[in-house]
């Protein structure tokens, strides 16, 4: 019975010029978006691979020099791209791509792409996620808004009801018909993305399982929109009213809510500005110990403690170069300060995230948005993960350089030059991204909200079809 | 006043009207009879310039409708099968609006008396049209003809769907207009009304005017016989 | 005839509760958006003020310190001596602030990407100044609910809601037959219906704008010409969308089909085209690689640093005017002068890399910006950012003005250091100061308004042509 209705719905849709045009446009848009994204991805990825090699080469091919000069010269950590970012670029263009690793400072990622682009780019990019998140829901609405209203307007609903079709079966059939129509667009897109991703040069990071889970989340999202469309179609008296109401819902969910949530998040827990952040760090640095200032009180205290520990009278008698040791202690101290401030920043960011979570209750777009970028490793959490890894590497690198200086030179010997083999001894920066299971477990919230959306709208659908007026 | 000269119309090669000619003079009521699809509505649409003739000419007051569409429309008033007005406006406001569109701005008293003359009760004048019955809406249409001082009236099955009383009232209104010298072209299925109110009768079949006669030439029974004869 | 029709249209619209509901919602959205924008601007202003206040407080501390050191009331470590020029040049930087333009609340534009207070120091290298603002990238991605958003995205939808069934509803109601039996031209009649709605919309938008200005406390008289410009831009934009709707109505389809067609136009012009342009531009003419630039810069830098240590004498050869006048005294800034000289060498070798990058980047940006003539919404966005002072061009200019100021700052100290001078209290008044000049940014809004005008005229001409050749049968059946 359900199958008969679903089949009739599909047949009607497929015979309709409007649907065929829209479906074709959807598939075409997905293809175009995917192809453009793939080219862009490869272009960026090539740059990254070269840049990573270059950075290492530049580091390794330094001449003999003072380890601390090398530390100031520093090196760069580049955020790798993952092949799923081809589907969802997430916040990539608003988060920097490289982190400069130098002495005394934890730098934030620099050179976000958006800063080099004009304001046009703020409209968004024609990437698959743009189509998947914004346009396909609109497609569902435009395809299904008159599912019930047209039957009512044509009087066929009366005929159907007089045949003794239960509202459950009618709903099931309509739902399936509409959803299968969506699948007709999505499945080619999915197959295409598997093919494209399979063709991307560095295949290593591609996980078909992750892609399948991503696909599943999108299907949940579309099921929610299918439900909403049918609820409104059953409730509205006329097709026009159904269409206008659904468009308003789409506007609020996909365009309005994210911005309103932004506003709330910003006023509830504002981010410090760059200069506020820098000032706060400097304030703490000023109060604490300074590796370049052997006369500050904190340094004096450390000196006394160290002398006592090694049971000597002066820093000259220590078994290592006191300058190097002091510098390392200073480095550790600044790292702590940066850690503290980044933790505060992280708290702010988490507070903001919880505002988005609350807003998700009003917009199915939001949880899907966050899930999608998380799985594609282009969300802010991934960026944090990378930034933390880079900082860890920086601390290790500074420790090696300072300790080498301390252990291989004598006090006051600022002209000491380390052999260039030292640069090679410091391992290259390697980055292990967050695992998919970690991603899923930290996004349980979003998954829960999305499922709650599905359950609630399904219940609403059942109730509204039961209460639906036939005339 | 109203003249069809070899008026023809075909849609994509399908002939809807085939060289129809007739004249309606002042004070005449020309009733077009015929089955559905015989070309009655097409004839009226041609006089309204809603469609372009494929051949021949429709003339109002000697002016070609297709060439002087705005000038001829000043002279005519039209009442379709189901006259639809703006539901959010009152009967009086609708009348004022449409009368104003045709360039004849009237003061409120004139319009109200036109509505009363058309038989609409005074307490209905200020009610929104969404509360009106079909008969009441048709009366606003007649009032428009009165307010506009129309010399030509085009009626497309104006009484279909009206109850007998309303239908009778409508016929009386037509008689009133007839006595004022209005030339009326009416498409109808109602042989009885055609005989009662019409002065001339034309029978159409598949786009051709197969019979033209005056109502005083024939009685009701013979008219019905003649009509059925043509239809079979 | 015109006024007559307007009167009855107005009567009908005013009796439709949907119309007033939608208009009230729209005004509320405008005010909410304006409030958001004002809050953002207030934060930005407060940040600038705070930085300036901190700077002034520090200045008076330094002055007091100089005073006590000069009078021998206080001894300080040599590297913390406020009388030393290099100390002040590095520790007492000026705040190079970009004050918000008067109408900044209109559009956030690119302002959320960049910081508005930069403090170039004497030791720092101007070319590595970071202009990025610290922010949650999710916030940047979702964008802000500002007036520009309401005007660019939501306003067309409101226009479409008022006009998608301009003709089709008359047809569906059945009143069209009676109207067409009257001596009126269809296009004139429909155009009048549209004009009334158009006036309502422009009035609503203008009122909201003025209301927003009053609430934000911006004196309208001072920004009168800009407000006029915005009203003109928005008027053209509204007119454009109305005529699009008029054209779609001419095809005589049902209201539902009209709505879908018009929404598709909206999706194409407001969502898809801008996204496609931005993406296509990226692959046709990619933004030059920053990563590459970093690499080349580092290579140039490390090459230059090898020779930098031996550089001071040749530096004097290039700058004899800087040589110390009294040669009997050892210059106390000897080390720093060497440092600056080596810095210059590095800068000189890095400059071509940077310059090449900057040239490529501005060429790319111009290429992308020229695409804005494809969609009215891009034109409006560009013009609004232009008026609000938040466009990419404004931030480019800020960057170059700050870099120029950094050079000026250095140029103030360097000759004095070569001459072995001390910092005095009164010197603080003579320090170079930074003011951001909005006038140095080329305005594009006249091109934008012409672009929008072309769109409006084009659609108007198309609509009148379409209605001239309209098949009347479409309207009747």
Image (tube, helix red, strand yellow):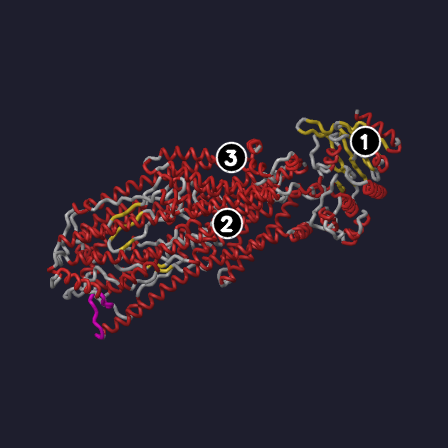
Residue of label 1:
B202
Determine the secondary structure under disc 3. helix
Residue of label 3:
A180
- Disc 2: CA contacts within 10 A as few (<14), some (14-19) or many (>=20): many
Is residue B130 shown to the viewer in this render?
yes
C249 horizontally vs A439: left or right: right
Q: Viewer-proximal residue, A260 or B169?
A: A260
The magenta segment is C72-83
C266 horizontally vs C117: left or right: right
x and y, in percent, of residue A219 in the image: 47, 39
Q: Where is B226 relative to C326, above or below?
A: above
What is the C-alpha distance between the residues marked 3 and 1? 58 Å
Q: Residue A289's image quarter?
A: bottom left
Q: Which residue is drawn at 21% across and 52% down?
A: A399
Chain letter for the residue marked with disc 1 in the picture: B
Determine the secondary structure under disc 1. strand
Q: Viewer-proximal residue, C398 or A270?
A: A270
């Amino acid at each position: 019975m359900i199958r008969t209705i679903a089949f009739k719905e599909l047949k009607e849709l497929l015979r309709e010029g409007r649907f065929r045009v829209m479906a074709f446009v959807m598939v075409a848009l997905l293809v175009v978006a995917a192809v453009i994204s793939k080219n862009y991805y490869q272009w960026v990825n090539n740059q990254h691979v070269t840049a990573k090699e270059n950075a290492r080469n530049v580091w390794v091919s330094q001449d003999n020099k003072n380890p601390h000069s090398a530390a100031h010269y520093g090196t760069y950590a580049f955020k790798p791209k993952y092949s799923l970012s081809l589907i969802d670029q997430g916040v990539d263009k608003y988060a920097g791509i490289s982190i400069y690793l130098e002495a005394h400072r934890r730098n934030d990622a620099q050179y976000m792409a958006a800063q080099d682009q004009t304001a046009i780019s703020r409209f968004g990019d024609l990437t698959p996620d743009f189509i998947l998140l914004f346009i396909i829901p609109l497609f569902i609405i435009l395809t299904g808004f008159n599912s019930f209203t047209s039957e009512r307007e044509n009087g066929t609903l009366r005929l159907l009801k007089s045949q003794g079709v239960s509202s459950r079966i009618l709903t099931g059939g309509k739902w399936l018909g509409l959803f299968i129509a969506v699948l007709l667009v999505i499945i080619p897109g999915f197959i295409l993305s598997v093919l494209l991703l399979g063709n991307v040069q560095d295949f290593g990071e591609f996980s078909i399982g992750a892609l399948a889970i991503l696909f599943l989340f999108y299907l949940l999202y579309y099921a929610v929109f299918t439900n909403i469309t049918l609820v409104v179609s059953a409730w509205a008296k006329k097709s026009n009213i159904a269409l206008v109401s659904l468009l308003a819902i789409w506007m609020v969910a996909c365009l309005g809510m994210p911005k309103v949530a932004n506003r709330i998040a910003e006023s509830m827990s504002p981010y410090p500005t760059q200069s506020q952040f820098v000032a706060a760090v400097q304030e703490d640095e000023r109060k604490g110990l300074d590796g370049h200032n052997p006369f500050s009180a904190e340094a004096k205290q450390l000196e006394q403690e160290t002398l006592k520990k090694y049971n000597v009278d002066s820093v000259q008698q220590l078994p290592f170069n006191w300058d190097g040791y002091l510098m390392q202690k200073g480095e550790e101290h600044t790292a702590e300060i940066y850690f503290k401030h980044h933790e505060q920043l992280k708290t702010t960011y988490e507070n903001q995230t919880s505002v988005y979570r609350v807003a998700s209750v009003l917009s199915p777009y939001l949880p899907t948005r966050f899930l999608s970028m998380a799985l594609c490793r282009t969300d802010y959490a991934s960026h944090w993960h990378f930034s933390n890894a880079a900082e860890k590497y920086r601390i290790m690198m500074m420790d090696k350089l300072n300790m080498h200086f301390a252990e291989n030179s004598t006090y006051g010997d600022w002209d000491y030059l380390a052999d260039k083999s030292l640069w090679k001894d410091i391992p290259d920066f390697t980055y292990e991204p967050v695992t998919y299971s970690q991603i899923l477990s930290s996004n349980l919230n979003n998954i829960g909200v999305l499922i709650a959306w599905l359950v609630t709208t399904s219940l609403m659908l059942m109730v509204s079809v039961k209460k639906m007026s036939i005339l | 006043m109203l003249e069809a000269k070899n008026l023809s119309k075909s849609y994509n090669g399908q002939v809807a009207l085939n060289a129809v000619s007739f004249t309606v003079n002042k004070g005449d009521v020309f009733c077009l009879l015929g089955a559905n699809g015989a070309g009655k509505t097409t004839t009226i649409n041609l006089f309204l310039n809603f469609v372009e003739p494929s051949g021949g000419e429709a003339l109002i007051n000697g002016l070609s409708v297709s060439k002087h569409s705005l000038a001829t429309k000043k002279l005519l008033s039209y009442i379709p099968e189901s006259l639809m007005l703006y539901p959010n406006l009152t009967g009086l406001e609708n009348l004022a609006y449409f009368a104003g569109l045709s360039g004849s701005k009237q003061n409120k008293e004139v319009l109200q008396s036109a509505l009363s003359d058309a038989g609409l009760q005074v307490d209905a004048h200020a009610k929104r049209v969404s509360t009106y019955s079909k008969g009441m809406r048709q009366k606003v249409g007649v009032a428009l003809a009165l307010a506009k001082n129309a010399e030509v009236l085009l009626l497309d099955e104006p009484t279909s769907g009206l109850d007998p009383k309303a239908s009778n009232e409508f016929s009386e209104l037509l008689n009133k207009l007839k006595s004022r010298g209005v030339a009326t072209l009416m498409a109808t299925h109602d042989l009885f009304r055609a005989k009662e109110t019409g002065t001339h009768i034309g029978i159409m079949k598949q786009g051709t005017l197969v019979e033209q006669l005056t109502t005083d030439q024939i009685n009701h029974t013979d008219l019905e016989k003649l009509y059925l004869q043509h239809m079979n | 005839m015109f006024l007559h029709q307007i009167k009855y249209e107005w009567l009908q619209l005013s009796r439709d509760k949907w119309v007033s509901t939608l208009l009230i919602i729209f005004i509320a959205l405008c005010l909410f958006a304006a409030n958001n924008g004002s809050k953002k601007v207030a934060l930005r202003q407060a940040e600038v003020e705070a930085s300036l206040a901190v700077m002034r407080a520090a200045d008076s501390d330094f002055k007091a310190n100089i005073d006590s050191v000069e009078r021998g009331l206080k001894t300080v470590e040599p590297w913390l001596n406020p009388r030393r020029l290099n100390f002040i040049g590095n520790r007492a930087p000026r705040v190079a602030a970009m004050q918000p333009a008067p109408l900044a609340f209109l559009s956030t534009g690119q302002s959320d990407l960049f910081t508005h207070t930069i403090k170039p120091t004497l030791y720092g290298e101007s070319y590595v100044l970071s202009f990025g603002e610290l922010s949650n990238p999710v916030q940047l991605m979702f964008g802000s609910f500002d007036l520009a958003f309401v005007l660019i995205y939501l306003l067309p939808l409101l226009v479409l809601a008022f006009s998608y069934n301009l003709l089709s509803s008359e047809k569906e109601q059945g009143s069209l037959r009676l109207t067409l039996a009257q001596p009126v031209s269809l296009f004139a009649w429909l155009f009048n219906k549209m004009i009334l709605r158009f006036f309502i919309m422009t009035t609503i938008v203008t009122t909201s704008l003025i209301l927003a200005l009053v609430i934000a406390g911006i004196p309208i008289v001072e920004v009168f010409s800009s407000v006029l410009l915005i009203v003109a831009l928005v008027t053209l934009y509204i007119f454009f969308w109305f005529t699009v709707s008029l054209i779609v109505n001419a095809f005589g389809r049902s209201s539902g089909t009209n709505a879908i067609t018009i929404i598709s136009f909206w999706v194409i012009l407001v969502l898809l085209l801008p996204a496609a342009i931005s993406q296509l531009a990226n692959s046709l003419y990619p933004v030059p690689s920053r990563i590459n630039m970093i690499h080349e810069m580092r290579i140039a830098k490390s090459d230059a640093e090898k020779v930098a240590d031996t550089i001071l004498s040749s530096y004097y050869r290039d700058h004899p005017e800087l040589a110390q006048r009294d040669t009997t005294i050892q210059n106390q800034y000897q080390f720093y002068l060497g440092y600056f000289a080596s810095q210059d060498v590095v800068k000189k070798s890095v400059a071509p890399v940077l310059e090449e990058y900057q040239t490529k980047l501005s060429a790319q940006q111009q290429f992308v910006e020229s695409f804005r003539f494809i969609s009215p919404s891009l034109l409006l966005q560009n013009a609004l950012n232009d008026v609000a002072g938040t466009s990419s061009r404004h931030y480019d200019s800020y960057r170059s003005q700050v870099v120029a100021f950094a050079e000026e700052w250095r140029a103030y100290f360097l000759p004095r250091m070569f001459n072995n001078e001390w910092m005095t209290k009164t010197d603080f008044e003579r320090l170079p100061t930074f003011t951001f000049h909005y006038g140095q940014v080329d305005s594009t809004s006249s091109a934008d308004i012409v672009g929008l005008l072309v769109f409006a005229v084009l659609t108007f001409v198309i609509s009148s042509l379409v209605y001239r050749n309209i098949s009347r049968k479409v309207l009747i059946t």
